[in-house]
Amino acid sequence: MKKSVWIILFTSVILLCGCSEKSENSGCIDSVSSEYFSDSVDDLISNPNNQVGNGYVIIHDEASFPAWVSEFRYGDGGNVIDFWGREVFSVTEKDLLFSCGISAHRFENGLYGYLNLNGETVIEPKYSEARPFVNGTALVAENGKQKYIDMNGNQSADKTHEGYHGDMTKHDWYGPFTGQYLVYQDADRDNAKVYYGYSDASGNDTAMPDVSKAYSFSNGFALIERENGEFYFIDERLQRVTDFSDEIEDRISRKGIAYTLWEGDLMLGNEYVFDDGYFVLNIGSAREPRFELIKILPKLYQP
C-alpha cells in the first residue's frame, strides 16, 4: 500500500491532543514495559465484541476499557472533548497542546500559563512564550529571558535528555530520552532525504533503514512509518510487533499523523502509547472525532 507522505524537517505539526494524567513523581517519563505484560489478556482476545488482529486487539467492549480512558482528552482547536465525544471545556485561543497532563494557553492578559485536563489554571499566566512539557520540564520566556520550569512553575533544569549518556553531537537532531531510547535524525539535504535511528542510554545507535518516520518511545513501544506508507510498532528490542490491516493503516494515513520532532513526549493518540500498550485512534474527523481503543499484543504477532 503506497501513500504520499510529506516529511517535515525540524518542525512540529500538531493535529491531535490526548493524554492521561501522570503521577507527580513520574516527571512524565515513560515506564519500561515488562516482557509483553504480566496481566492476563485472554479475556480481551476471547471477547466476541473485540476484534483480534496480528499483534493487536481493537477493544469495542467498554467493560474492558482501562481507567485512564475517562481522562483521555482530544483538542480540536479550543474545544476539548473526552473519549466519548463530550465537551470537557473550551477556550477562545486555539493553542491547546497537552503533554504531561497540562497545556500552555494564552490568557486574557496576553501572557501564557498552563491549564490542566479540566481547563483549570495550574500555572499562572506570566510568560511571553511557553512550550509544551517534555519529561516534566518546559521552556518558557519571562521578561525577555528563557528558562525551564517544572510542573509546579518553579525554575528547573532541562530534563529533555536526562538519563542519556551518549554523544549528542553525532546526529543532526535528537528526540527526548524517555527511559528506553531516544530517536535521532540525520538529513541528507542534497538528496532531500531523512534517516532515522534509535540510541540507547549509553549512546549505542541502531539505524532504521527503509523508514520515512520514526517516533519516540512511550511505555515500551514506538511507532514506525515505512517509506511505502506502512505503519507498525516496534518493541524495546527494536523488533516489529504489529501488522495492521489495510483498513487501520488507511485510517492512520487519512487522519494525518502528527509530526512531533521536537516534543516526542507529547501524548498524541496513535503516536503515544499509554500504559500496558494501549493507544487511541481517531476514526472520525477532526470536527467530528470518533475514537477506537487498540492494545498492542506482541504475543499475537506472526511475521
Image (cartoon, rainbow, N blue to C red):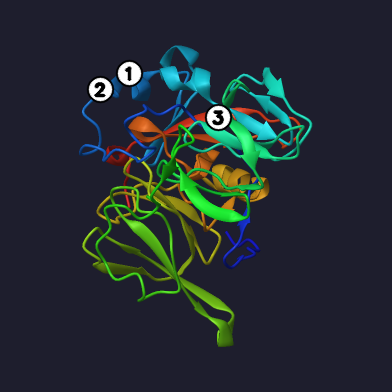
At a point 74% along the width and 32% down the height, the residue shown is: 78
* Mark sitting on residue 43: 1
Above or below — where is 145 with respect to 136?
below
Q: Nearer the viewer, residue 59 or 150?
A: 150
Can see residue 73?
yes
Left/right placement of residue 143 relative to residue 214 reads right
At a point 49% along the width and 53% down the height, the residue shown is: 231
Left/right placement of residue 299 relative to residue 175 reads left
Which type of secondary structure does the marked residue at label 1 adopt?
Answer: helix
Q: Residues within 10 Å of mark 3 (few under 14, many from 20)?
A: some
Quote the CA–CA distance across marks 3 and 1: 18 Å
User: Picture coordinates of residue 56 (x, y %)?
Assistant: 40, 37
* Residue under pointer 3: 292
Q: Nearer the viewer, residue 143 or 252?
A: 143
Can see residue 65?
no
Left/right placement of residue 264 relative to residue 237 reads right
